[in-house]
Image (cartoon, grey):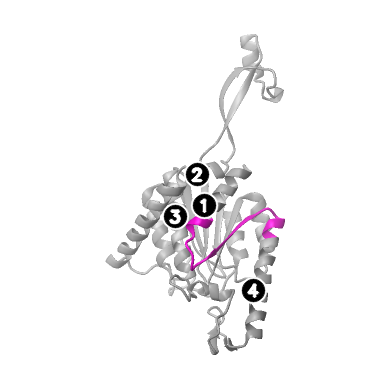
């Protein structure tokens, strides 16, 4: 399913160059999947529920609520039902493709890193035979693909997140989560990849975090947290188009800018902790693998 609000957005024609980009991204992230995540991925996420496995004779300490009275009556001894955790997962990638993702002062823009992360997580799902879906959003839901299995499906998702051209430029985290809550009936693992250049999403995140296993991945450029002295610099808001000039040679201004950025980041961190939703901060000028490995290890210890 594709939601397309205008003829301006969507996918560019499939070209040899596009196929090459998709293939290179797949190969690069596939190596990371096999080297790092294949043995750790399933141990940190819970399945959808419990499936009946077998019955066995009752032993002291077994939960009497699991006694199978029909089998017990036939056998003349108490028997209990044994359950195993359903291991199949449904992964949903919610990826912010708003205009602020095009900002970049280092070797990678936020949207490029978001594409790599999406490919990595999608290939993790493929390796472990899980379903994976994709939702691309700005201040509206631009593109939605329901969770499915299979290599062909995963390659389509990688292509989509890499080259999709959004219609809008703004950001609404709440819109992406509200749509997801209506689209997914079963409990799923949601990876919300965004720079969170938005407001008013707290209620939607609370609700989504109660219904699903929600992990927020915040991408940021180092210049969004710390300025370097470069004199008068014009800055244009990529989402609103507003242009302002700032004096980066002013030490006092740089200090105020950094304190404000730090307070906002600390506020987001405190909010996510207060509702027990995991949050990963990823600066785009640093390798993201170690941060993801650290997160996976933390989830393993917590389980």
SS assignment at label 1: helix
What is the C-alpha distance between the residues marked 3 and 1?
Answer: 12 Å
| Residue 232: mark in rendering | none
Q: Residue at x 44, y 55 (%)?
A: 120
Relative height, residue 223 to residue 54 (above, below): below
What is the C-alpha distance between the residues marked 3 and 2?
Answer: 14 Å
| Residue 40: mark in rendering | 2
What is the C-alpha distance between the residues marked 2 and 4?
Answer: 34 Å
Circle 3 residue = 120
Q: Residue at x 70, y 21 (%)?
A: 61
Is residue 48 found inside the magenta-colored segment of the image?
no
Q: Position of residue 65 (x, y in %)?
A: 70, 25
Circle 4 residue = 261
Is residue 287 found inside the magenta-colored segment of the image?
yes
The 10 Å Cα crowd at callout 4, few under 14, some 14 to 19, many 20 or more, is some
Disc on the earlier residue, 2 or 4: 2
Task: State the extent of the magenta-drawn residues as a range.
Answer: 271-291
Circles 3, 2 touching at the beta carbon (< 8 Å)? no
Disc on the earlier residue, 3 or 1: 3
Circle 1 residue = 293
Disc on the earlier residue, 1 or 2: 2
Q: Nearer the viewer, residue 252 or 70?
A: 252
Relative height, residue 185 to residue 64 (above, below): below
Disc on the earlier residue, 1 or 4: 4
Q: Nearer the viewer, residue 3 or 80?
A: 80
């Amino acid at each position: 399913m594709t939601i397309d609000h205008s003829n301006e957005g969507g996918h560019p024609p499939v070209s040899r160059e596009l196929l090459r980009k998709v293939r290179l991204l797949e190969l690069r992230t596939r190596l990371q999947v096999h080297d790092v995540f294949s043995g750790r991925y399933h141990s940190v996420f819970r399945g959808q529920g419990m499936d009946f496995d077998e019955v066995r004779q009752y032993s002291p300490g077994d939960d009497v609520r699991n006694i199978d009275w029909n089998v017990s009556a036939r056998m003349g001894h108490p028997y209990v039902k044994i359950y195993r955790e359903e291991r199949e997962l449904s992964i949903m990638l919610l990826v912010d493709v708003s205009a602020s993702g095009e900002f970049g002062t280092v070797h990678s823009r936020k949207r490029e890193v978001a594409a790599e992360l999406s490919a990595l997580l999608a290939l993790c799902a493929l390796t472990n035979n899980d379903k994976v879906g994709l939702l691309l959003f700005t201040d509206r839901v631009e593109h939605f693909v329901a969770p499915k299995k299979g290599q062909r499906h995963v390659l389509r998702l990688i292509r989509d997140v890499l080259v999709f051209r959004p219609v809008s430029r703004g950001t609404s985290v709440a819109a992406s989560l509200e749509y997801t809550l209506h689209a997914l009936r079963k409990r799923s693992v949601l990876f919300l990849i965004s720079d969170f250049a938005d407001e008013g999403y707290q209620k939607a995140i609370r609700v989504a975090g109660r219904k699903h296993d929600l992990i927020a991945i915040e991408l940021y450029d180092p210049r969004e947290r710390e300025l370097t002295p470069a004199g008068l610099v014009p800055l244009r808001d990529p989402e609103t188009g507003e242009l302002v000039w700032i004096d980066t040679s002013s030490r006092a201004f740089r200090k105020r800018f950094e304190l404000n950025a730090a307070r906002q980041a600390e506020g987001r961190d405190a909010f996510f902790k207060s509702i027990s939703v995991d949050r990963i901060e990823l600066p785009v000028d640093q390798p993201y693998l170690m941060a993801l490995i650290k997160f996976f290890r933390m989830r393993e210890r917590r389980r």
